[in-house]
Image (cartoon, rainbow, N blue to C red):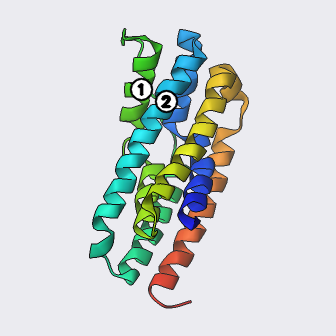
Amino acid sequence: MDALMAAFVAALLIQPGSRSTWLAAILADRFARPGQVIIGAVIAIAIGNAVAGFGGLWVAHILTPNARALLLALALAFAGIGCVERLKPPDPLAKWRIGAFATSLFGIGILAAGDSVQFLTFVFSIRSDAPVLAAIGATLGASVVTAAAIVAGEKARRKVPIRAIRIATGVLFLIAGAIAALSAFGLI
């Protein structure tokens, strides 16, 4: 259950400032079919987190407890760095002519591949007895935020202080990463 909540909270914190959420809002405005965009986005998020969870299950037995703790510190630090760096606008995929669902599924899936949420899902699944819970938690957290962005649309998203949210989240993850690193080295 720890992996489910940790992944859920991490996704809730990281996803509002992600490029995939921004793209989802853009696609919702472009296609004016929020239901199809939500379904495509949620499936893309679920597939990415399932792959991350399976990867964690696959390598969990190879790592020592200290290596797992250090990997958690690294994932938290990378998430923090990713949040404080400037966010590039996503390609709006204007030339894609495959419909709202397919554009959302493939566009968001490609953009989210290997992002901070998936890396943390991978790490939480390594540290869990039930890695599927990390994938479920991250999928739920990221899907809630992405669906809200889709319903609100790009114009509403622009009114949200995304930069401030990203910096605050980044600082939080950098502090958590530093604490996790100190703990991994047995210094606290």
Q: Is residue 167 left or right of residue 118?
A: right
* The C terminus - image quarter: bottom right
Q: Position of residue 159 (x, y in %)?
A: 72, 29
Name which of mark 1 and mark 2 comes first in the sequence: 2
Q: Secondary structure at mark 1?
A: helix
Give the residue type that dot 2 points to.
Ala
Q: Kindly give the residue lying farthest to the bottom in the view shown.
A: 187
Q: Position of residue 75 (x, y in %)?
A: 44, 63
Residue drawn at x 55%, y 52% as measured from the top left? 137
What residue would you read off at disc 2?
Answer: 41
Give the residue type that dot 1 points to.
Leu
Up-down relation of residue 71 to residue 4 (above or below): below
State whether residue 89 appears in this view: no
* The N terminus - image quarter: bottom right
Q: Position of residue 69 (x, y in %)?
A: 44, 77
Using the numbered discs, state the Cα–Cα distance from disc 1 to disc 2 in whole angstroms.
Answer: 5 Å
Specify few, some or many for label 2: CA neighbours under 10 Å numbering under 14, 14-19, or 20 or more. Answer: many
Residue drawn at x 65%, y 21% as measured from the top left? 153
State whether residue 157 appears in this view: yes
Specify few, some or many for label 1: CA neighbours under 10 Å numbering under 14, 14-19, or 20 or more. Answer: many
Residue drawn at x 40%, y 58% as measured from the top left? 122
Q: Position of residue 142 (x, y in %)?
A: 56, 42
Residue drawn at x 46%, y 38% as measured from the top left? 45
As rendered, which of 147 and 153 lies closer to the eye?
Answer: 147
As rendered, which of 171 and 45 lies closer to the eye?
Answer: 45
Q: Is residue 101 left or right of residue 114?
A: right
What residue would you read off at disc 1?
Answer: 105
CB contact under 8 Å: marks 1 and 2: yes
